[in-house]
């Protein structure tokens, strides 16, 4: 039995979204976490997780700060089932700590796997709530955007605490996702922005308000298929994120390389300080921008079409 969940990227609005501003995120269905469930091979017993060659045996006494054990316990409670006698093998294409939502995708795939194994329904609305609880263990104060876009696997215009708003795509567009190769913890970047905010609330709120305005304009561009303007809005969003101190020299290098090679727009995506950046390209410029990103030191470049 196999279940899965996709990666995601934030198109615009990260960090400000934690403070109630809107953000836009899209799933990346070609990069996925897959969970395969199979009966245990004797003499193994109980609920076992195999991931990247590492085997974990689940016990109800596993420490509460272990996000995977916490997730398993939460799912079993929600499903009203005891730990099944099964091995779940997780396989992921998504780089970890890279702003692509690998943690939320692992949790979502795992929740779906457990529901299937114990043969109980777990609807997306409930799964989304549960994945959000686990995101708190990973991130401290997550906005909820990662779990939402990953569980529903559709583009979203997201406002913390508000009902989910689907985002119709007026015309498909192509993004390159380039990995800096630097791993960075979202919770550290989020905590640093919080410190900035506490030290100078008016000036940081000014950045958030400007980002919110960019996100609202971007929503309209996406709906009517105005990709050129969308690119300019993404680049403007990157400048604001740089001022919020969440860029890095490597992200700057990649963003500049993409712009120089003809991308319509480029920005860091997710928590920042490393991880991934995105570049909006046309079918004509995709190849040259991809080459430029690799030449500027990208560890990997993925191409995805939205819409
Ligand atoms: O680094 P990621 O992909 O998990 O994205 C985090 C997005 C933030 O806005 C920085 C935090 C959040 O919880 O929304």
Image (cartoon, rainbow, N blue to C red):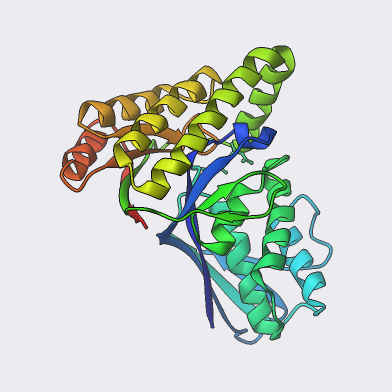
Q: In this view, does 78 lie above or below 219?
A: below
Q: Is residue 215 above or below residue 45?
A: above
Quarter in which the N terminus is drawn: bottom right
Residue 257: % across, % down: 26, 28
Please give the name of the residue rendered at 33% of the width and 46% of the height, measured from the top-left corner: 175
Residue 214: % across, % down: 49, 31
Q: Nearer the viewer, residue 85 or 239?
A: 239
Q: Is residue 109 left or right of residue 125?
A: left
Please give the name of the residue rendered at 63% of the width and 35% of the height, measured from the top-left corner: 21
Q: Quadrant of residue 165?
A: bottom right
Residue 237: % across, % down: 46, 28
Please give the name of the residue rendered at 70% of the width and 49% of the height, measured from the top-left corner: 162
Q: Quadrant of ligand 1?
A: top right
Q: Is residue 165 above or below residue 111?
A: above
Please give the name of the residue rendered at 68% of the width and 28% of the height, measured from the top-left corner: 191
Q: Quadrant of residue 76?
A: bottom right
Q: Nearer the viewer, residue 148 or 81?
A: 148
Q: Which of 109 and 206 is in front in this view?
A: 206
Count of numbered circles in the view: 0
Quarter in which the C terminus is drawn: bottom left
Q: Which of 214 and 68 is in front in this view?
A: 214
Q: In which quarter of the image is residue 279?
A: top left
């Amino acid at each position: 039995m196999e279940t899965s969940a996709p990666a995601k990227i934030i198109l615009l609005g990260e960090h400000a979204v934690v403070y109630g501003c809107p953000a836009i995120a899209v799933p990346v269905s070609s990069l996925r976490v897959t969970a395969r469930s199979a009966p245990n091979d004797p003499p193994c017993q109980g609920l076992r997780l195999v991931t990247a060659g590492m085997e974990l045996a689940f016990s109800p006494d596993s420490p509460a700060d272990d996000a995977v054990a916490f997730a398993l316990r939460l799912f079993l409670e929600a499903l009203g089932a005891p730990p099944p006698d099964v091995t779940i093998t997780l396989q992921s294409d998504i780089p970890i700590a890279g702003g692509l939502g690998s943690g939320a995708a692992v949790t979502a795939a795992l929740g779906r796997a457990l529901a299937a194994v114990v043969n109980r329904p777990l609807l997306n609305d409930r799964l989304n709530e549960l994945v959000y609880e686990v995101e708190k263990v990973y991130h401290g104060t997550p906005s909820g955007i990662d779990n939402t876009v990953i569980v529903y696997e559709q583009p979203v215009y997201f406002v913390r605490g508000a009902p989910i708003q689907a985002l119709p795509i007026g015309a498909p567009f192509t993004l390159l996702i380039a990995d800096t190769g630097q791993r960075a913890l979202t919770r550290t970047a989020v905590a640093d922005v919080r410190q900035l905010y506490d030290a100078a609330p008016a000036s940081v709120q000014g950045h958030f308000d400007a980002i919110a305005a960019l996100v609202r304009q971007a929503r309209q561009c996406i709906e009517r298929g105005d990709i050129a303007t969308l690119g300019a809005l993404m680049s403007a969003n990157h400048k604001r994120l740089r001022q919020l101190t969440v860029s890095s020299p490597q992200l700057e290098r990649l963003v500049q390389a993409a712009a120089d090679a003809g991308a319509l727009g480029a920005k860091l995506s997710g928590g920042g300080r490393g991880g991934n950046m995105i570049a909006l390209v046309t079918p004509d410029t995709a190849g040259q921008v991809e080459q430029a990103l690799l030449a500027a030191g990208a560890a990997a470049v993925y191409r995805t079409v939205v819409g």
